[in-house]
Image (spheres, grey):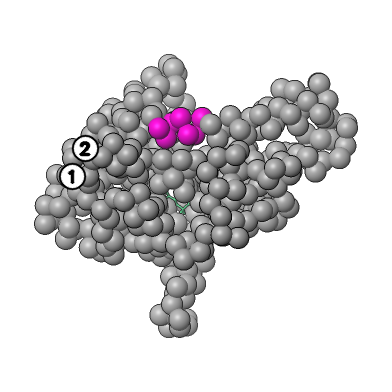
Amino acid sequence: MDKTKAAGHGKAENVGLSSDGKRVIIIDQTRLPSKKVLLELGTPGEMYDAILGLKVRGAPAIGIFAACSMYCLAQQIGTEKMESFIEELETYGDYLNSSRPTAVNLSWAISRMLRTARLHEQKGRGKVLAALGRECRIIQEEDVAMCRAISEYGLTLIQEGDGILTHCNAGPLATSRYGTALGPLMLGAERGMKFKVYADETRPLLQGARLTSYELLQAGIDVTLICDNMAAAVMKNGWVQACFVGCDRVAANGDTANKIGTSGVAVLANYYGIPFYVLGPSSTIDLDCHAGDEIEIELREEDEIKKKYYKQPMAPDGVKCYNPAFDVTDHSLITGIVTEKGILKAPYEEQIRKIFNQKEIRR
Ligand code: MRU
């Protein structure tokens, strides 16, 4: 299928429901940029594989996808006995949640759907299903609003003509619309502003090359693709005025997990005196995680380094590979965390506590 509008609740978004509400529809991100293919997923296995295989990816998009999946799976639970219904839904939630560990939006969305189911449990199956359908729509709509607000705040940090370096993909494909790290650039472009964006290709899975440069080109934004190891050179040339990156899990002290290579960009930015901003919705902040060393980092197959995207293997057969999908940027390297609630500055723990109205954060 070569359509762009099927996903979303009647809108052009990356994740949505089929018209009968029984299957989740996504744009298969692994086929971009050469083909825009829509997938309709109805079984738990298909949903799990879509997350693990990065057909749907980016923390907010994974959360929205998980919420829609929970709704679809709930409809497949036949029993009217609500205790068994909730138990089965929890089992589906645990299964989906085990697909990838780092992005907190996955467990966040699943917990939210389970909470909704429990809240309406007494009213019977029909009412629970209706509430779940509403909740996944709300999660998606909230994400659109959060990305829009993040984009507005982010835009205040840059000037017309600035060079912005970004890593991985935190654009519309990774969210509902607008994106987080790319949001201010998309919004600025809508308003006629011009920027020069440097997109790291993002080894080993090339989200920067395949997705970020594709999205920016489509939006008419001046984008230059660079290999990850060229970031220092463009910074040294004076071409970068700010770094904008997304996030998969932000600890309560501001330490931030994002795509592998992000912390290297932060170290370089720090060295060259370039502001380094993390942009993400408050749903990516994990108050249960005090510091970055508590964040579980996903380890992926070594063939992604050795073979993927090459016609023939690019490394000798027996060589060992280490392939963490994410790294943690120390909060001391982060100039600001841009959320829908405003731009947080150090001391992060205090500011994060404030936006969540918490007196104290658990240690
Ligand atoms: O492995 P991925 O492609 O899911 O990693 C995605 C990232 O690291 C993004 O920067 C992050 O999820 C933020 S998306 C708005």
Picture residue at 66% right of the left edge, 53% below the top: 40
**Residue hosting label 2:** 158
Is residue 286 shown to the viewer in this render? no
> Is 70 above or below relative to 354?
below
Q: Is residue 336 left or right of residue 339?
A: left
> Is 254 above or below relative to 273?
above
The kind of residue on which mark 1 rests is: Asp
The kind of residue on which mark 2 rests is: Ile
Picture residue at 45% right of the left edge, 81% below the top: 311
- Disc 1 is placed on an element classified as loop
- For label 1, the crowd category at 10 Å Cα-Cα, with few meaning under 14, some 14 to 19 and many 20 or more, is some
Q: How many marks?
A: 2
Disc 2 under 8 Å from ligand 1? The reply is no
Q: Residue 319, percent across and down?
A: 44, 78
- For label 2, the crowd category at 10 Å Cα-Cα, with few meaning under 14, some 14 to 19 and many 20 or more, is some
Q: Quadrant of residue 345?
A: top left
Q: Which residues are magenta?
A: 142-148
Looking at this view, name the residue that lies furthest to the right.
Answer: 80
Q: Are marks 2 and 1 in contact (CB under 8 Å)?
A: yes
Q: Residue 122, percent across and down?
A: 81, 21
- Identify the disc placed on residue 162: 1
Picture residue at 47% right of the left edge, 26% below the top: 362
Picture residue at 53% right of the left edge, 31% below the top: 141
Q: What predominant SS class does the magenta segment belong to?
A: helix
> Is 297 above or below relative to 227?
above
Q: Quadrant of the C terminus?
A: top left
Is residue 81 shown to the viewer in this render? yes
Q: Is residue 20 left or right of residue 8?
A: right
Gap in Å between the C-alphas at discs 2 and 1? 7 Å
Q: In front here: 198 or 189?
A: 189
Q: Quadrant of the N terminus?
A: bottom right
